[in-house]
Image: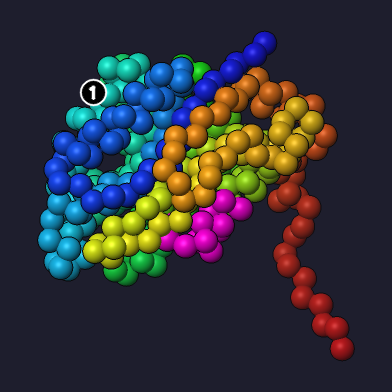
Amino acid sequence: MSRRVRIAASQYFLRPIASFEDFEAQAGAWIEAAKDYRCRLVLFPEYFTAQLLSLGDPRRPLREQIEGLANLEGRFVEFFRSQAKRHGLTVVAGTIPSWGGGKSRLVNRCHVFGPSGSESFQDKLQMTRFESEEWDVRSGHGLRLFESDFGKFAVNICYDVEFPEFAREAARQGAELLLVPSCTDDRRGFLRVRYCAAARAIENQLYVVHSGTVGSIASLPAAALNYGQAAFLTPCDYPFARDGILTEGVTNEESLVVGEFDLALISECRTSGTVLPLRDSAKTANLFGPIEFVALP
């Protein structure tokens, strides 16, 4: 039986804005477009909220700018909650710096809103050097599995997808879909995330949706460069796309990329695929003992 779900992934264009209402208008337009295309979920990128930094003084120290962004979290949450409920969509609202760790500890938080207006979140678990050293944003704790009306999904925020353990555990707990909101400034950073996202789809036999920021706000160090491309990635087996790419956007162009997955194929490939990497991963611990060091004179 088909379990088809249509999803929208934003290639969100960072441009200077004059008010919070401008941000709401841009993000809200993409949610409305996702609804028009009969999507059930829309994904925004990591740190697409950096656009809001253009409302303040770009000469302030970076840490002060990030704290100011975190102080807008309440208004951000209320806007996306209302949008999810109004349009009856699941909205995975990229990320925003959050005081979720207390007033002295910022985390990078992805808010997830259900079509009824319910709200949860996934914090980023592994920090990049820039986040930890320049912004003093700290690691979150705990991986969450979201149960929607179409299936279970997890969120790996950008750098998190480069750590296979996170997606593997989500897949073992029943996740059929992995969402990867990201923010990368150049091709190298983008490809690190993209290649790892494709690997997670193959090794865990699940679908991956990757969303990224594009555009530039030259006056803001936090948003000066962006390199992104949204993509819908699949396992590499007969029921799926030939090259493991269902669809993808045009690199660095503002766009909403729409794709449709049949989640029933995930269950099928996990039990009768050409290879069964998710099942066989349980055996790996028994296939080798302590590492043997062999001298080759």
x 44%, y 35%: residue: 256
Is 268 located above or below residue 104 in the figure?
above
The residue nearer to you, when weighing 224 against 123, is: 224
x 41%, y 43%: residue: 254
Would residue 97 be seen by someone viewing this image from the given angle?
no
Give the image location of residue 180, x and y in percent: 48, 43
The way the protein has been coloured in the rendering is: rainbow
The residue nearer to you, when weighing 123 against 59, is: 59
Left or right of residue 280, residue 47 in this image:
left
The residue nearer to you, when weighing 93 against 121, is: 93
Left or right of residue 258, residue 104 in this image:
left
x 35%, y 27%: residue: 31
Give the image location of residue 154, x and y in percent: 48, 36
Left or right of residue 146, residue 117 in this image:
left
- Residue indicated by mark 1: 82
Q: Residue furthest top?
A: 1
Would residue 59 be seen by someone viewing this image from the given angle?
yes
Q: Residue furthest bottom?
A: 297
Is 210 located above or below residue 263 in the figure?
below
Give the image location of residue 135, x and y in percent: 27, 64
Q: Residues within 10 Å of mark 1 (few under 14, many from 20)?
A: some
- Count of number-bearing discs: 1
Label 1: state its secondary structure.
Answer: helix
Query: Which residues lie in the magenta part?
Result: 184-195
The residue nearer to you, when weighing 251 against 143, is: 251
Question: Which quarter of the rendered picture does the C terminus lie within?
Answer: bottom right
Q: Is residue 189 magenta?
A: yes
Give the image location of residue 212, x and y in percent: 44, 47
Q: Is residue 103 magenta?
A: no
Amino acid type at circle 1 is: Ser
x 24%, y 64%: residue: 219
